[in-house]
Image: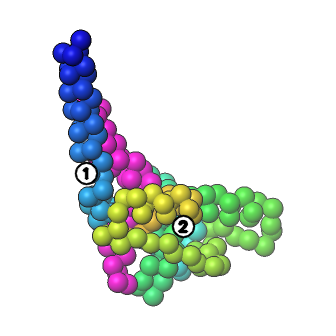
């Protein structure tokens, strides 16, 4: 009987140690470790049609919008879909000739730093419902993290071997 208990304890201890190691990897991983450094951006003066084409051609859900050479806002595929829906009921709007700045009336830019934790990224995604977040150091755009990047990172860091 005591051999069985000892064997169970050893097995459970190994599982707990493995889980602890995986969680430690998550705690020690920073946004800069999983962000994409090759960032696709648009300018606030670019047309909505250009933004739609950029999202489709690059198979992304959001793009960083720059103004005066600095990150200004994030444009999502949903933003474009909403704008095209509104335009369908208006004879005054022209989706193909409207600029991004005309769509983004109140730019909000929630961003992360490369040194922020993955938990910080998860909280930001959850709090604001964004799918794309710029990574900014000082005033400089250094990367971008999408919610899919965060999920892949968690899967890689926490997932059991062989998954």
Tell me if I can see residue 2 in this picture.
yes
The reply to whether the magenta stretch includes residue 142 is: yes
Percent across and percent down for residue 155 are 34, 42
Residue beneath disc 2: 75
Residue beneath disc 1: 25
Q: Is residue 6 above or below residue 44?
A: above
The reply to whether the magenta stretch includes residue 151 is: yes
Number of numbered discs on residues: 2
Outermost residue toward the front in this view: 2
Relative to residue 112, is residue 23 drawn left or right? left
Outermost residue toward the bottom in this view: 68
Q: Is residue 131 above or below residue 46?
A: above
Dot 2 lies on which element? strand
Percent across and percent down for residue 51 are 52, 65
Residue at 40%, 48% (x, y): give it: 151
Percent across and percent down for residue 4 are 23, 15
Specify the color scheme: rainbow
Residue at 72%, 58% (x, y): give it: 85
Dot 1 lies on which element? helix
Q: Which quadrant is home to the C terminus?
A: top left
Relative to residue 121, is residue 20 drawn left or right? left
Q: Nearer the viewer, residue 30 or 22?
A: 22
N-terminal label among 1 and 2: 1
Q: Nearer the viewer, residue 7 or 63?
A: 7
Magenta-drawn segment: 136-163
Residue at 40%, 70% (x, y): give it: 112
Residue at 45%, 57% (x, y): give it: 122
């Amino acid at each position: 009987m005591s051999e069985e208990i000892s064997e169970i304890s050893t097995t459970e201890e190994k599982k707990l140690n493995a889980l602890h190691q995986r969680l430690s990897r998550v705690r020690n991983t920073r946004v800069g470790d999983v962000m994409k450094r090759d960032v696709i951006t648009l300018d606030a003066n670019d047309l909505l049609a250009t933004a739609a084409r950029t999202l489709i051609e690059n198979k992304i859900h959001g793009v960083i919008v720059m103004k005066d050479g600095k990150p200004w806002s994030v444009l999502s595929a949903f933003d474009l879909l909403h704008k095209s829906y509104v335009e369908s009921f208006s004879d005054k709007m022209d989706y193909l000739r409207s600029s991004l700045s005309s769509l983004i009336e109140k730019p909000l830019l929630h961003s992360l730093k490369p040194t922020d934790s993955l938990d910080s990224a998860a909280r930001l995604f959850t709090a604001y419902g964004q799918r794309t977040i710029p990574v900014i150091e000082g005033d400089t755009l250094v990367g971008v993290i999408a919610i899919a990047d965060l999920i892949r990172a968690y899967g890689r860091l926490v997932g059991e071997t062989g998954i």
